[in-house]
Image (cartoon, rainbow, N blue to C red):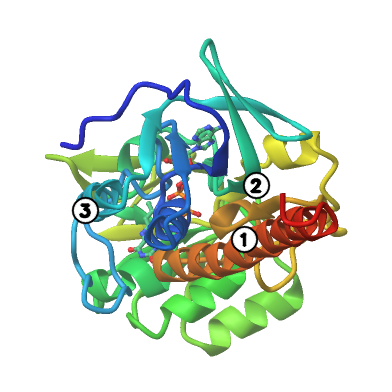
Amino acid sequence: MIKTMDAPDDGVFDVVVIGAGAAGLNAALLLGRARRKVAVVDAGEPRNAPAAHMHGFLSRDGSDPTALLELGRAEVARYGVRLIRGRVDQIDHGYQVRMVGGPVLAARRVLVATGLRDELPDIPGVRERWGKDLLHCPYCHAYEVRDQPLAVLGVHPNAVHQALLLRGWSDDVVFFAHTLALTAQDRERLEARGLRIVEGEVKQLVADDDRLRGVELADGRVVPRAAAFLFPRMVARDELLTGLGCARDDGGWVTTDRTGRTSVAGVWAAGNVVDPRAQVVTAAGMGSAAAFAINTDLLDEDVDRAVEQHRAMVAGGGR
Ligand SMILES: Cc1cc2nc3c(=O)[nH]c(=O)nc-3n(C[C@H](O)[C@H](O)[C@H](O)COP(=O)(O)OP(=O)(O)OC[C@H]3O[C@@H](n4cnc5c(N)ncnc54)[C@H](O)[C@@H]3O)c2cc1C
């Protein structure tokens, strides 16, 4: 366990990173190695915490997601990055990073890597099974339940695509229509791919000995299933960015350029906070790209300042 440090009282950080998931930590790693003065503030709630295993990250496939972040914290600490446990509730232009009930950190640049929140439907059993045998991303977890009886819960318009995708891992996929109004085209596509559609509202997920047993419908039927998938409503934790006035797209997501630069000068964003599709490896890559760009931006400022001082010195006859 890495001991987090007390908040510093020693001046301005080159960069304050908010969020120590894969995106924030990978950025901090590069910035620390670039010998920048960096603080990372983290509330300790990474999105994939409910899952026991992380997949799809080269050389880390199947590892414990918590252990990955623990390793990451140890790596950044080696380069002098200060790790601060806490929650940021506001960033003032300039930049003053305000922590809840705590100190204010002054920063030259800010990287927001606060991830997103998965809003789950209010169906009994859903919260308890989430990340265990109630899953979301086929690329992350479907291989582990391949060839088993699978369920897809119709709680989101993307559920149909999710079910069609899952068919690649099992030939026994049941689509529970629940409250989703399926179009004739949806039905045709699902049936054409050999998925079974079960009508009726889902009452609850049924589990025994901490393992999913089936999906119970409002009429009392229980359809045995070994694992279920649902597409949650993904809500960006982007209040810090929107509070600064960062531009958003039509879907409400904060926009960035390819390096993670937002529309507000000096403010970058990386990972799920700006891209719901980002997996762990993608989020880490986005953090890395942002770190390059932030360091270059700082360098430009450092050089401009040095040139100004140099010119003043030359004009003053070298005194
Ligand atoms: C159940 C589940 C399983 C998954 N499995 C996989 C998998 O196997 N493979 C894979 O590639 N992806 C998986 N994912 C997706 C994965 O979780 C994300 O890709 C990844 O977490 C994104 O990293 P991030 O750094 O953007 O955000 P996060 O990992 O969510 O980190 C954000 C951090 O910011 C902190 N934070 C938020 N707000 C504040 C604030 N105001 N102040 C301070 N700190 C704050 C949070 O507490 C958190 O620690 C899974 C997702 C879920 C839900």
Near mark 1 (Cα within 10 A), the count class, few <14, some 14-19 or many ≥20, is many
Gap in angstroms between the C-alphas marked 2 and 1: 7 Å
Q: Nearer the viewer, residue 196 or 211?
A: 211
Residue at the spot 69% in from the left edge and 36% down from the top edge: 240
Q: Nearer the viewer, residue 301 or 130?
A: 301
Q: Nearer the viewer, residue 161 or 5?
A: 5
Single out the residue that lies furthest toward the top. 101
Which callout, 3 or 1, points to the residue nearer the camera? 1
The residue pinned by badge 3 equals 71
The residue pinned by badge 1 equals 294
Residue 312, given in percent of the width and then of the height, sits at 81, 53
Question: Helix, strand, or loop for circle 2?
Answer: strand
- Kindly identify the amino acid type of the residue bearing the numbered disc 2: Arg
Residue 184, given in percent of the width and then of the height, sits at 74, 76
The image quadrant of residue 94 is top right
Residue 266, given in percent of the width and then of the height, sits at 73, 50
Disc 2 residue lies near ligand 1 with CB under 8 A? no
The reply to whether callout 3 and callout 1 are in contact (CB within 8 Å) is no
User: Residue 166 — which label?
Assistant: none
The image quadrant of residue 151 is bottom left
N-terminal of the pair, mark 2 or mark 1, is 2
Near mark 2 (Cα within 10 A), the count class, few <14, some 14-19 or many ≥20, is many
